[in-house]
């Protein structure tokens, strides 16, 4: 298994107003997110979802270093004033890593002679 850069789940919640429409907040956030990940080693927006019937945007991004990603976000802030955009970030881990670190289970399986035989 090749080493993949860590992935992060970003959840943006918007508080639109008369002066700052939801569409403008979403467009500005996507633009800032794209610029920020482009400045990071192995940085990329993998998935981007607009949640239906809620003022929310979900992004899955990858980056080699979380500190570098945070610095890139600080250098490319979402263009909004006050508390119109709230963001939560959670790291995502491949199942194999989580199983080993949290559950103590080794998920590296090897085929045996029994598995190769036809019943």
Image: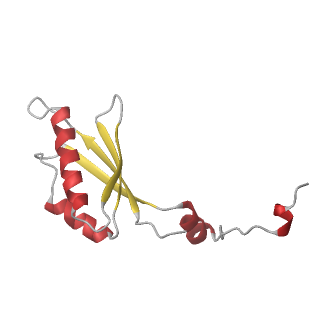
Count how many numbered circles sit on residues in the image: 0
Please provide percent x and percent y for residue 33. Answer: 23, 52
Q: Residue at x 16, y 44 (%)?
A: 28
- Which quarter of the figure has residue 25? top left
The type of colouring in the image is: secondary structure
111 or 13: which is nearer to us?
A: 111
66 or 109: which is nearer to us?
A: 109
| In the depicted structure, whether residue 22 falls above or below residue 12 | above
4 or 106: which is nearer to us?
A: 4
- Which quarter of the figure has residue 84? top left
Single out the residue that lies furthest toward the right.
119
Q: Residue at x 28, y 70 (%)?
A: 67
Please provide percent x and percent y for residue 50. Answer: 33, 37
| In the depicted structure, whether residue 30 falls above or below residue 36 | above
Please provide percent x and percent y for residue 35. Answer: 19, 55
Please provide percent x and percent y for residue 3. Answer: 47, 70
- Which quarter of the figure has residue 5? bottom left
Side (left or right) of 101 relative to 52: right
Q: Residue at x 10, y 46 (%)?
A: 81
Q: Residue at x 21, y 67 (%)?
A: 71
| In the depicted structure, whether residue 51 falls above or below residue 93 | above
């Amino acid at each position: 298994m090749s080493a993949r850069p860590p992935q992060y789940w970003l959840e943006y919640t918007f508080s639109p107003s008369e002066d700052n429409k939801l569409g403008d907040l979403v467009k500005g956030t996507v633009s800032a997110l794209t610029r920020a990940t482009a400045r990071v080693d192995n940085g990329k927006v993998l998935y981007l979802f607009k949640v239906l019937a809620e003022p929310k945007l979900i992004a899955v991004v990858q980056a080699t270093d979380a500190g570098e990603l945070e610095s890139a976000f600080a250098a490319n802030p979402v263009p909004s004033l006050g508390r119109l955009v709230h963001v939560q970030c959670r790291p995502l881990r491949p199942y194999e890593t989580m199983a080993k670190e949290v559950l103590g289970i080794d998920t590296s399986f090897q085929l045996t002679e029994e598995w190769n035989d036809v019943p």
